[in-house]
Image (cartoon, grey):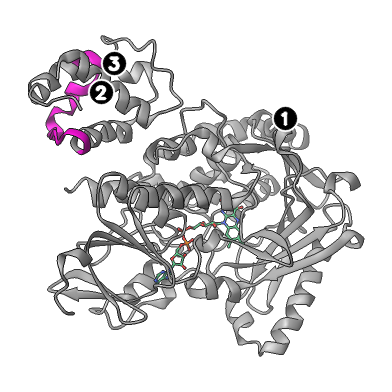
Amino acid sequence: MTPAEIRDEILDILEDISPDEDLDGLKDDVPFRDQLELDSMDFLDIVMELRKRYRVQIPEEDYGALASMGSTVEYLEPKMRDIVKS
Amino acid sequence: MTESNASDHYDTIIIGAGMSGLAAGIRLAHFDQRVCILERHYTIGGLNSFYRMGGRDYDVGLHAMTNFAKRGDKKGPLAKLIRQLRFRWDDFKLAEQIGSSIRFPGVSLDFTNDIELLETEIEQRFPGQIDGFRSLCDSLLDYSDMDGGDQRFMRSAREVMAEHISEPLLIEMLLCPLMWYGNARENDMDFGQFCIMFRACYLEGFGRPFKGVRMILKNLVRKFRGLGGELKLRSGVAKIHVDNGRAVGVVLDDGTELTGTRILSSAGNVETMRMCDDITEVDVARAGKLSFIESISVLDRMPQSFGFDRTIVFYNDSESFHWSRPEHSLCDARTGVICSPNNYIYDGDEGELPDGVVRITTLANHDRWCALPDDKYQAEKVRQYEAAVASSVRFMPDFRRYVVDTDVFTPKTIRRFTWHDNGAVYGAPQKQLDGTTHLPNVFLCGTDQGFVGIVGAIVSGISMANRHCLQVQ
Ligand SMILES: Cc1cc2nc3c(=O)[nH]c(=O)nc-3n(C[C@H](O)[C@H](O)[C@H](O)COP(=O)(O)OP(=O)(O)OC[C@H]3O[C@@H](n4cnc5c(N)ncnc54)[C@H](O)[C@@H]3O)c2cc1C
């Protein structure tokens, strides 16, 4: 997957977790927390959705990398590079 | 237990298809677990089910869903559960209450889903107390402090309230709805539970889906099945089989055996312990004692047509509010909850409910109801219905001449359909907030874990599933 595809995938997960949220104006360099009402339960859900969909494992000590869209895509790129977008 | 083949093996076995079990099931099935919900009754819902009688639909327990949130609200338990279960706001589509009242002799406080009204009411009726009320609001624990770790959780709510409010009557009045809607402890309340209920009732408020509890349950069960979850009705768990200090599976009432990696039970703490075959005696004294009788009246007109527009009235007929099991009588109608499901602000396109309805809940003694021989039991249902209604009409317009149909259920009914000891509605006073048991792979959810009410039970199912069944993988 390309970084752009990974970004789409994260958007899809966010859309799934929070269908009533407007994600159109989401800024990549601003923490999710400052733009969306996500709490720790929701962050755990992003991790679990990635595991469910792509078998990507994210160890707990790396959760900090998921702070914003930009940092998330950067962190996931090496892990998802070889996954073919379905 | 015989070796089962892999196709009978579940990642998680859930006991009970009430709100908490169904919510937990959705979380686990969503994350690809093989999960089975076992329910002893022939239908889902547990303490908040629904039934049809004489051509009419009835809810067992839904007066109001607490924790109201508007479309687009992102904070609070309701928004959280909608996200966690991947619902949309419209799946619940709650209509807001018109307004509720706390009525004591000679004084009444109205409240809505906007705390400002309650503040104004307190300012008018108890002018010296408004600052105390505001400082009490400021001292409330947050939902995030609710895992029991906070030292203040177990404090006496009455004690904390008295630090802020000096008028005893106001303390009694504020406690009345909160105890009615979620306190398993007699006479006093844990401060943590007080904070949960204060937020749920006064800060967030009441709502109801037009179609009542069946709408919520049908959504839950449809989602669960859609994710591949298995639901087995008429499948009571007789025994949890323990081997080498771990649960390995369950034996159903009909002898069927199922194995599971872990078990999540909403049957209650004492009730679950009793199923474990490594335990010979359970401490039944730990079960809750508070149970109710529900007196439902179907009317030939809408309550607003005779001047009753309240969604809920919490009444008490003296200056002190008694929250305990009636020891020497079947029922105690000195305090009660009056609810009219008609008095919500439903959407124009939903129209009106088919009938006017008034529901009254009063305290009742399970053991006394169960000790009655059958003919006496039937006669007492009629008598106690009349007593509850007679008590309530002191606090609302008399509606007795409009009644066209009635139904009554008692602690015995509640016990018979939910298997909770004593027909206890809010479970044991001592909660097991972390959901653990003496076995490393058996966990509790629902009433006895800590959160009660419809929203509370759903949140409990979600958080126990997350904590004990998903994160460990
Ligand atoms: C009269 C009344 C009015 C209420 N009013 C309101 C209200 O207005 N608003 C509100 O929010 N809440 C209300 N409640 C409370 C609310 O209904 C409960 O707090 C909530 O439904 C509890 O859900 P639960 O999943 O924890 O437990 P339960 O619903 O009790 O679920 C447990 C399930 O386990 C099943 N079970 C038990 N033992 C076994 C076994 N051995 N094997 C298999 N299955 C078993 C039971 O049959 C049951 O279905 C009311 C309750 C009552 C009784």
Q: CA distance from mark 1 to mark 2?
A: 49 Å
Main structural element of the magenta stretch: helix, strand or loop?
Answer: helix
> Which residue lies at the image location 64% right of the left edge and 50% below the top edge?
B177
Q: Which residues are magenta?
A: A52-71
What residue type is disc 3 on? Pro
The residue positioned farthest toward the front in the image shown: A86
Where is residue A26, by image quadrant? Answer: top left
Q: CA distance from mark 3 to mark 2?
A: 17 Å
Q: From the viewer's side, name the closer residue of B394 and B124.
A: B394
Question: Which callout, 1 or 3, points to the residue nearer the camera?
Answer: 3
**Mark 3, residue position:** A31
Question: Which callout, 1 or 2, points to the residue nearer the camera?
Answer: 2
> Which residue lies at the image location 62% right of the left edge and 49% below the top edge?
B212
What residue type is disc 1 on? Thr
Residue B234 position in % (x across, y down): 44, 72
Vertical side of B196 occupied by B397: above or below: below
Mark 2 residue crowding within 10 angstroms, few (<14) / some (14–19) / many (20+): some
Mark 3 secondary-structure assignment: loop
Q: CA distance from mark 1 to mark 3?
A: 39 Å
Vertical side of B81 occupied by A35: above or below: above
Read off the chain for label 3. A
Instruction: Give the quarter of the figure containing the N terminus of chain B.
Output: bottom left
**Mark 1, residue position:** B120
Residue B70 relative to residue A29: left or right:
right
